[in-house]
Image (cartoon, rainbow, N blue to C red):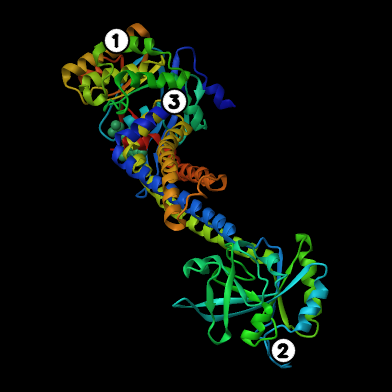
Amino acid sequence: MHSLMFFELAQRNVRLHWLRSLLAILGIIIGVVTIVSMGILGNSLVLAISDSLSTVGDSIIVTPHVGGMGFGGSQSSNLLSERDVEQIRRAATPHVTIPVYSGSSRMKIGSEDTVGTVYGLKSDDIPLLLEIEDGSFLRGSSGAMVGSTFAEENDIKVGSRINLGEKGSVRVVGILKERGMGFDINPDFGIVVEDQWFRQAFEQEEYNQVIVKVKDLNQIEEVKDAIDRTMNRKETTVDVIDTKAILETILTTFGQISMFTTVIGGISLIVAGVSILNIMLMSVTERIKEIGVIRSIGTQRKEVRRMFLYEALILGLIGSAIGGALSIIGGYAVSMVMLQTTEYLFVPSSLVYIVYGVGFGLGTSLISGLYPAWKASNLNPIDALRHE
Amino acid sequence: MEEAINLECDGDTIIRFREVTKVYPLPGGDVVALDKVSLDIGKGDFIAIMGPSGSGKSTLLNLMGCLDTPTAGNLCIKGRNIRGMSDEDLTILRRDYLGFIFQQFNLLPLLTALENVQYPLILKTGSRECLDRCKEVLEAMDLDETLFSHKPSELSGGQQQRVAIARALVNDPEILLADEPTGNLDSKTGAAIMHLLDDLNRNRGKTIIMVTHDPSIAEYAHRVIRIVDGKIS
Ligand SMILES: Nc1ncnc2c1ncn2[C@@H]1O[C@H](COP(=O)(O)OP(=O)(O)O)[C@@H](O)[C@H]1O
Ligand SMILES: [Mg+2]
């Protein structure tokens, strides 16, 4: 009951100074909305990225080592020879080893001129890496499969003919399913041809990279080490990376970006906190005499403290509640603008930011109220009474 | 504990000062507001404290009101030495045994007349089931019931002081402390307030200590304590 009276007093004071209370509440609202929207944006970004990544972290990618000192000069080609591939295959057994050619070329589709990536793969390996949307996998050596984005942009269909200039021309036998961003190959923006055709057209015998598909994720490290030991015994000839590690790095990076944006939201909340601190100090200064009166008629220090903390709490509560509600709209807006989708909004890991935001809003308000409340409660009753 | 025995109040003494000194340390040098004051106030007394401005009247009253503690000497309220008492205990003493009446009324501006009277009672009992008692006390102060829901700013000075006295009385304290209670009122209203205080002293047995510089107001008291330069003369 006791507390109720102090709450009532605090509430009346908030209402009496409604304009400045409103401004402080506005500050909290903005802070909470920012923190939540940024949090939701960051989280949606991470979710969106991990969704658009094709690789599930089950591959090891072996590429020729670049930037070597070149002392021996033995590995100047920057490509992987048939012998290298054999060594890798042996080290990686029983997992599947897929050697890959890649290059880029001008292409003419109908009358349109463009540039695209060309991958050369053994026809047996293609189903291991890629899925088909339309048409069929490669059989003959002059066919090609086209990445979904590339096909869409250039209006390519099964049966279309792509002219690669003096390299020759290929007929499209299949359209690939959209694969998403990959760390190994990115066929969405190019075409896939048979290795034999690639060797001829690009006049290149050696491979650009080797992909090892590891069936059991727990063996990734082991296989990676085996390849590294075999290939880089004397000097570093190849770089061995696993997509799991890259995936983790990327996700941590985006996690950090999301953290950073949330911190920016936090800063705006601190500003709001300062404004609460400010109006609370004003409130204390204006009411020094009143504090003297209530102290002299038997109000304890802690009760004075409570009265002022309630005031901060009321501001924080209203601001955080409205802010929490508005941040759903804010989250919706940033998702639409930045990601063009809201599918990552109504998931627990995004919505939890509303809880954080409201919590931080309340916390900031209370912390901002601490000093003014302490100041009010420590006034000497006589001095406060004499105050005019 | 020699001192404690020395300070023991007999049945009738409700406030006892023994060599009480109050010094305000100020940057420009210490101000001795009270200089070794000794005095006894009995239960049911009605005392006027008079003296020139700055002589220490308010300081004396504030010490009795447990708003401050002596720099030296001993001060006993209801047999309890307030020297060295914690702020919390002093606050409880103020709430339960002392009623304050101020020159500027000092009602809480956010509360209505009735709520101002309720305030100390809720502080003490923690309960709001006290409306009847508060109304009774207000009515006894001759305040019209239609004014109960008014804010202090909507009341005249005399009406505000009546509410303030009701607030001071609601916890049924034994001692009422009034610092120039009529100082902000015209003489007619002042006289009406003094009649109320006189009645409380006569018929309800309240011990009243009042600061005033008005001799006609001081006439209501049984005893006048004159103070000059922090000393009782
Ligand atoms: N809180 C205080 N701080 C410093 N000096 C004070 C304080 N209260 C009173 N004094 C000084 O103590 C002396 C007595 O003051 P006071 O008791 O208020 O006198 P009166 O009420 O008789 O006018 C004055 O010189 C005054 O300036
Ligand atoms: Mg005075």
Question: Mark 1 and mark 2, same subunit?
Answer: no
Residue B84's x, y, as percent?
52, 32
Q: Residue furthest top?
A: B203
Image point 34% across, 20% down: which residue? Answer: B115
Q: Is residue B172 visible?
A: yes
Q: Which mark is residue B139?
A: 1
Q: Secondary structure at mark 3?
A: helix
For residue A363, above or below residue A160: above
Q: Residues within 10 Å of mark 3 (few under 14, many from 20)?
A: some
The amino acid type found where label 1 is placed reads Glu
Question: Mark 2 and mark 3, same subunit?
Answer: yes
Give the Cα separation between the discs numbered 2 and 3.
82 Å
Q: Is residue B75 visible?
A: no
Q: Is residue B191 left or right of residue A250?
A: left
Q: Secondary structure at mark 2?
A: loop
Q: Name the mark nearer the viewer: 2 or 3.
A: 2
The quadrant of the picture occupied by the C terminus of chain A is: top left
Image point 44% across, 44% down: which residue? Answer: A328
Question: Mark 3 and mark 1, same subunit?
Answer: no
The amino acid type found where label 2 is placed reads Gln
Q: Which residue is mark 3?
A: A4
Residue B23's x, y, as percent?
40, 39
For residue A387, above or below residue A116: above
Give the Cα separation between the discs numbered 1 and 2.
107 Å
The amino acid type found where label 3 is placed reads Leu
Give the Cα separation between the discs numbered 3 and 1.
26 Å
Looking at the image, do the residues carrying marks 3 and 1 touch, with CB atoms under 8 Å apart? no
Q: Secondary structure at mark 1?
A: helix
Q: Which residue is mark 2?
A: A75
